[in-house]
């Protein structure tokens, strides 16, 4: 009943089928069940005698039977597949009338002059439950992000007490978020078992949503430390080339998602700066991320040049731009300009204020030039050597 290959005995294939943890069901081109293994009996609750000779539709919910019949007929006649043949997820129907989520892969061979198909079926009930739990977690995380952003709009006149509250809340949120990101990474790595491509996309969205919320939390923590005067500078020699590569690796996918052209400074100049790498990285990611956020078409360009003992990092975009009367307002914490495009982009309103405060903490500053409808250029001017505990 089972296909054979050179140098492998029929007994070996029979033993493989009998001991396989996945259900194996063999049918002919009329969808009649020819053979099943013990795992199929356990999965569907029928004995082999009850299944052999019956139509394959016995093991399917009513809503899938017509699709199965027409699909098999079309494939036998034309070779056209109606579903993917590897890793397709479909429900099966047990003898007791309950459904079981399955991951199914198909094979085909000829038994003499007879066209025969093999279905390999795996019960993915636990995986589906985990996926649903992760999706629910992602929804809760997105709701938490929206709540944080909504509260941020009302926090312009926040006192130090509220800053302390935000910091405490942020610390409490980071632990479950890190756990969520870690479990998502494990699922994407195939632990405890590989997941289908469609599920990978959903889990990747969960992972990205978690990381987005973590970045929002870190932004709030940085703002709280700056406002309280507790942010410190820890400098060391930094390879500008390596740091630029890291920043571009973060921003390039964001630009690609919006179909924007991204121009970076190549591999970055081979120069060493004496600065706080974490703070410089945060400033550059904020400026570039902001450029991508407010650019709907065109490009974002990142360039580096030197002026004496200072490095100048420029970020230019072809986005919505800022009106002259609003150029000062963009540096105000929690400020969102009253503009439809600005509102739709979201955010906490902390990115630019935090970036400028960090730049000043490093002994530099940020300047902006902007034309509404044509784009903006933000330039970070930073000394090549910054000293620890620089005052804001």
Image (cartoon, rainbow, N blue to C red):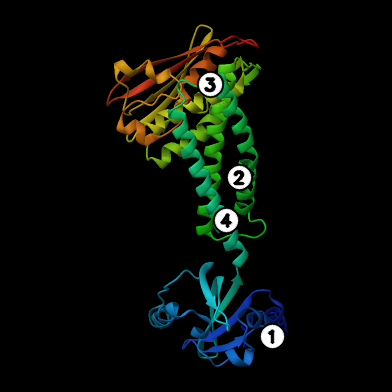
* C-alpha distance separating marks 3 and 4: 46 Å
Q: Hey, which quadrant is residue 10 in on the image? A: bottom right
* Front-lying residue, 363 or 81: 363
Q: Are marks 4 and 2 in contact (CB under 8 Å)?
A: no
Q: Total number of numbered labels? A: 4
Tag in front: 4 or 2: 4
- Local packing at callout 1 (Cα closer than 10 Å; few below 14, some 14-19, many 20+) is some
Which of label 3 and label 4 is nearer to you?
4
Q: Are marks 2 and 3 in contact (CB under 8 Å)?
A: no
Q: Which residue: 53% across, 30% down?
A: 247
- Name which residue lies at 50% across and 88% down: 55
Q: Which numbered disc, 2 or 3, marks the residue that appears first in the sequence?
A: 2
| Mark with earlier residue (2, 1) | 1
Q: Which residue is mark 3?
A: 269
Q: Earlier in the sequence, mark 3 or mark 1?
A: 1
Residue at numbered disc 4 = 133
| Disc 2: which residue | 181
Distance Cα–Cα, label 2 vs label 1? 47 Å
Front position in the image: 338 or 44: 338
Vertical relation: 18 (above or below) 139? below
Q: Circle 1 is placed at which residue position?
A: 10
The answer to whether residue 138 shows anywhere in this view is: yes
């Amino acid at each position: 009943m089972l296909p054979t290959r050179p140098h492998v005995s029929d007994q070996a294939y029979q033993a493989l089928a009998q001991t396989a943890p996945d259900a194996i069901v063999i049918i002919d081109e009329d969808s009649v069940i020819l053979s099943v293994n013990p795992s199929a009996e356990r999965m569907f609750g029928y004995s082999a005698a009850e299944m052999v000779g019956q139509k394959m539709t016995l093991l399917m919910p009513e809503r899938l039977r017509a699709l199965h019949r027409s699909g098999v007929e079309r494939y036998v006649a034309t070779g056209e597949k109606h579903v993917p043949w590897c890793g397709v997820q479909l429900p099966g129907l047990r003898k007791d009338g309950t459904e079981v989520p399955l991951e199914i892969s198909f094979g085909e061979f000829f038994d003499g002059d007879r066209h025969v198909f093999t279905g390999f079926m795996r019960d993915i009930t636990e995986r589906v439950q985990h996926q649903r739990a992760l999706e629910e977690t992602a929804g809760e995380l997105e709701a938490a992000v929206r709540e944080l952003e909504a509260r941020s709009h009302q926090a312009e006149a926040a006192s130090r007490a509220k800053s302390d509250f935000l910091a405490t809340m942020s610390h409490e949120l980071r632990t479950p978020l890190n756990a969520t990101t870690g479990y998502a990474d494990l699922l994407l790595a195939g632990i405890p078992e590989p997941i289908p491509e469609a599920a990978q996309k959903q889990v990747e969205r969960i992972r990205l949503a978690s990381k987005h919320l973590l970045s929002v939390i870190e932004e709030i923590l940085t703002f709280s430390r700056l406002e309280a005067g507790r942010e410190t500078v820890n400098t060391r020699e930094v390879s500008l080339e390596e740091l630029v590569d890291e920043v571009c690796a973060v921003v390039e996918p964001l630009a690609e998602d919006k179909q924007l052209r991204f121009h970076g400074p190549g591999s970055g100049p081979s120069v060493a700066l004496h600065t706080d790498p974490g703070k410089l990285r945060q400033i550059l990611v904020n400026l570039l991320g902001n450029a991508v956020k407010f650019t709907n078409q065109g490009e974002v360009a990142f360039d580096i040049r030197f002026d004496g003992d200072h490095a100048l990092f420029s970020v230019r975009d072809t986005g919505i731009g800022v009106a002259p009367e609003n150029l000062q307002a963009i540096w105000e914490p929690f400020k969102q300009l009253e503009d439809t495009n600005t509102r739709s982009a979201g955010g906490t309103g902390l990115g630019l204020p935090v970036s400028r405060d960090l730049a000043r903490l490093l002994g530099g500053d940020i300047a902006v030039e902007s034309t509404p409808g044509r784009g903006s250029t933000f330039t970070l001017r930073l000394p090549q050597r910054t000293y620890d505990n620089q005052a804001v």
